[in-house]
Image (spheres, rainbow, N blue to C red):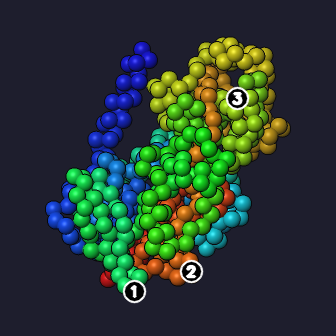
C-alpha cells in the first residue's frame, strides 16, 4: 500500500513537471548571437512576473532558465501570498492595512529591513494579488501565517498550495504573450561595455553550445542560495549539516554573477530556517497547518512554544527539544480546513491515531500527558486566551475524530541577504550607484526581509518587485 501511494505521488510530480516544463516557445539558440530588448535570468515567480510586465510595456524578452522546468522555489511555496487591503480581505471582513503589514514585516525582521523597500512591498501588495487574480489565479482563501497581526495570506480555495497556482498562472500569461522562455539554458556571464553598462549575456543552450544575447537590460531573478550548503555555511557556520527545503537550482549563481560586475551585497549572513521540515528528506510542511490550528509537541507530549511565532523563534524552540525534533499535531478538524494537508497524508508522512490516546501510544508518548495538552489547548481556544504561550490566533478546537502527528525539524529555507537594490529594482554597486541596465528581484536580492522573513512575504516580494523590475527595465531600453 505504501509503495502504491508513493508511486501516485511520484506520478503526480511527473505530471506537474510536464505541465510546467518550458512555456511552449522554449527552443535552443540557432546562432552564436541573438538580440533582444531584455534578458530575464531565472523563470521563477519574480522572473515570470518581470517578463510578463516587460512584454506588457512592449519590450521583447528572452527568459533563461537553467532547470528543465519553470517555477523554481515559487513552485514549492504552499502557505500563501501576503497582501493588505485586498478585495478578498474586504469580502471576508478582514480589517488589514498597509501600515499593519509594514509594521509586522519590520518587527518580524528585527527592524533590519530597508524601510523604503518594506514600505513599497506593503503598498504594492494588494495590487500584486489582484493583478494575479486578473490573470486567472485563485487567491480567494485568506489565512494567517506566523508574525502577522491579521489574516493576509492569500491562497486558492480551501487552502490549496499557492505556489503552483501562481506559477501556472504566470506560465499561461507568458505563453499567451509569446514570450521566449528557454528552459535548460544557463546564463554564464553578464557582459558590460567599456562604460560599465550592460550589453549582453553569455549563455549555454540545451545542447551545451555557447551563445551570446545582445541586450541593453538584464533582470536577475535567479533566487537565493539556500540550496548550496557550501554557500550558506560560508556565511553562517552554525548551519553546517542542515538540510534544505530549496530546489537544487537555488545555488546563488545570480548573486555571484552580479558580484563580478561590482554589485554590493547586503545582509548575506541573514539565513532563515523553516521550523517544520521532515527530518529524513527536508520536505517542507507549510506554515498554514499551524495557522489553521495545529500545535507543536515534544516527546513528553507537551507544547513548548507559540506555534505561530516567527520562524526563527519557532525553529530555535524545536532545536531545544530532545533529539532536536518535535511533532506537528493536528486532527480531522484542521485537516478538513486545509487542502494542502492531503498530500502529506498521501505521502504517509503522518502517524495516524483513532484518538489522542491511540496516537500517543504510536508515538511512544505518555497518553495522559498528551490528553492533558490537547484538553488545555481546547480550553484556551474557548477562552480565547493561551495562558501558556500567548498564541493570539487559535481558529479551531480539536475534536473527536482522528489525530495526526508529523515529525519535524528545522531546515534552511530562505536567504534574506543578496544583491542590494533601490526602489526601482536597479542593482547598486559598492559606491551606491546603479549599474546601468541591471535589475534584480526576488530572493536574489537582500534588504527587504531583514533578520527574518515572515511566511507569505516571499511571494509578495517576488510579484511586487518582479513587476517593478520588468516595467523599469522596459522603460530603460526604450
Q: Is residue 173 visible?
A: no
Q: Which residue is mark 3?
A: 323
Q: Is residue 429 visible?
A: yes
Q: Say if mark 2 contacts mark 1, CB within 8 Å.
A: no
Q: If you read the primary sequence from the N terminus, does the residue marked by circle 2 or circle 3 appear first?
A: 3
Q: Secondary structure at mark 2?
A: loop
Q: Nearer the viewer, residue 50 or 256?
A: 256
Residue at screen point 29% across, 43% down = 19
Depth check, mark 1 against mark 3: the one in front is 1
Task: Characterize the local packing of mark 2: few (<14), some (14-19) or many (20 or more) Cα atoms within 10 angstroms.
Answer: few
The residue depicted at 37 percent of the width and 85 percent of the height is: 194
Residue 175 in the image: state x and y as whole percent.
26, 57
Is 188 situated above or below 199?
above
Binning the other alpha carbons within 10 Å of mark 3 as few (below 14), some (14 to 19) or many (20 upward) gives few
Asked if residue 259 lies left or right of residue 406, the reply is left
Residue located beneath label 1 in the image: 195
Q: CA distance from mark 2 to mark 3?
A: 46 Å
Query: Label 2, label 1: how many angstroms apart (C-alpha)?
Result: 17 Å
- 468 w.r.t. 313: above or below: below
Give x and y (percent) for residue 148.
66, 53
Which percent across, then down, holds residue 121?
56, 66
Callout 3 secondary element: helix
Depth check, mark 2 against mark 1: the one in front is 1
Picture quarter containing residue 299? top right
The residue under label 2 is: 432
Q: Position of residue 160 (x, y in %)?
A: 47, 40
Amino acid at each position: 500500500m505504501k509503495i502504491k501511494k508513493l508511486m501516485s505521488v511520484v506520478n503526480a510530480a511527473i505530471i506537474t513537471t510536464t505541465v510546467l516544463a518550458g512555456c511552449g516557445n522554449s527552443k535552443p539558440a540557432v546562432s552564436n548571437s541573438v538580440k533582444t530588448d531584455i534578458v530575464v535570468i531565472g523563470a521563477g515567480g519574480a522572473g515570470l512576473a518581470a517578463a510578463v510586465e516587460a512584454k506588457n510595456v512592449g519590450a521583447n524578452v528572452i527568459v533563461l532558465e537553467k532547470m528543465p522546468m519553470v517555477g523554481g522555489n515559487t513552485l514549492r511555496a504552499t502557505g500563501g501570498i501576503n497582501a493588505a487591503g485586498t478585495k478578498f480581505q474586504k469580502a471576508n471582513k478582514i480589517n488589514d492595512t498597509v501600515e499593519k503589514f509594514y509594521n509586522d514585516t519590520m518587527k518580524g525582521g528585527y527592524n533590519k529591513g530597508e524601510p523604503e523597500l518594506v514600505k513599497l512591498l506593503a503598498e504594492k501588495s494588494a495590487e500584486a494579488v489582484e493583478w494575479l487574480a486578473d490573470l486567472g489565479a485563485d487567491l480567494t482563501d485568506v489565512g494567517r501565517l506566523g508574525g502577522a497581526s491579521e489574516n493576509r495570506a492569500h491562497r486558492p480555495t480551501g487552502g490549496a498550495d499557492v505556489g503552483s497556482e501562481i506559477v501556472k498562472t504566470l506560465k499561461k500569461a507568458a505563453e499567451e504573450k509569446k514570450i521566449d522562455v528557454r528552459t535548460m539554458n544557463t546564463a554564464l556571464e553578464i557582459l558590460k561595455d567599456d562604460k560599465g553598462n550592460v550589453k549582453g549575456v553569455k549563455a549555454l543552450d540545451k545542447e551545451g553550445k555557447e551563445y551570446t544575447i545582445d541586450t541593453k537590460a538584464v533582470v536577475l531573478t535567479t533566487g537565493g542560495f539556500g540550496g548550496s550548503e557550501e554557500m550558506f555555511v560560508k556565511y553562517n557556520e552554525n548551519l553546517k549539516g542542515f538540510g534544505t527545503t530549496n530546489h537544487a537550482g537555488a545555488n546563488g549563481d545570480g548573486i555571484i554573477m552580479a558580484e563580478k560586475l561590482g554589485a554590493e551585497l547586503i545582509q548575506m549572513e541573514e539565513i532563515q530556517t523553516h521550523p517544520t521540515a521532515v527530518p529524513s528528506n527536508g520536505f517542507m510542511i507549510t506554515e498554514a497547518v499551524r495557522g489553521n490550528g495545529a500545535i507543536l509537541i515534544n516527546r513528553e507530549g507537551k507544547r513548548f512554544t507559540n506555534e505561530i511565532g516567527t520562524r526563527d523563534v519557532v525553529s530555535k524552540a524545536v532545536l531545544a527539544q530532545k533529539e532536536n525534533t518535535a511533532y506537528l499535531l493536528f486532527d480531522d478538524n484542521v485537516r478538513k480546513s486545509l487542502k494542502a494537508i492531503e498530500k502529506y497524508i498521501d505521502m504517509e508522512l503522518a502517524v495516524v491515531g483513532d484518538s489522542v490516546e491511540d496516537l500517543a501510544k504510536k508515538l511512544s508518548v505518555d497518553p495522559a500527558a498528551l490528553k492533558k495538552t490537547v484538553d488545555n489547548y481546547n480550553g484556551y481556544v474557548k477562552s480565547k486566551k493561551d495562558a501558556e504561550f500567548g498564541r493570539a490566533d487559535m481558529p479551531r478546537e480539536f475534536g473527536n475524530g482522528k489525530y495526526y502527528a508529523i515529525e519535524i525539524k528545522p531546515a534552511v529555507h530562505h536567504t534574506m541577504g543578496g544583491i542590494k537594490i533601490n526602489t526601482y529594482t536597479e542593482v547598486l554597486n559598492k559606491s551606491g550607484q546603479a549599474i546601468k541596465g541591471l535589475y534584480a528581484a526576488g530572493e536574489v536580492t537582500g534588504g527587504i526581509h531583514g533578520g527574518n522573513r515572515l511566511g507569505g512575504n516571499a511571494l509578495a516580494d517576488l510579484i511586487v518587485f518582479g513587476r517593478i523590475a520588468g516595467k523599469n527595465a522596459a522603460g530603460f531600453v526604450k
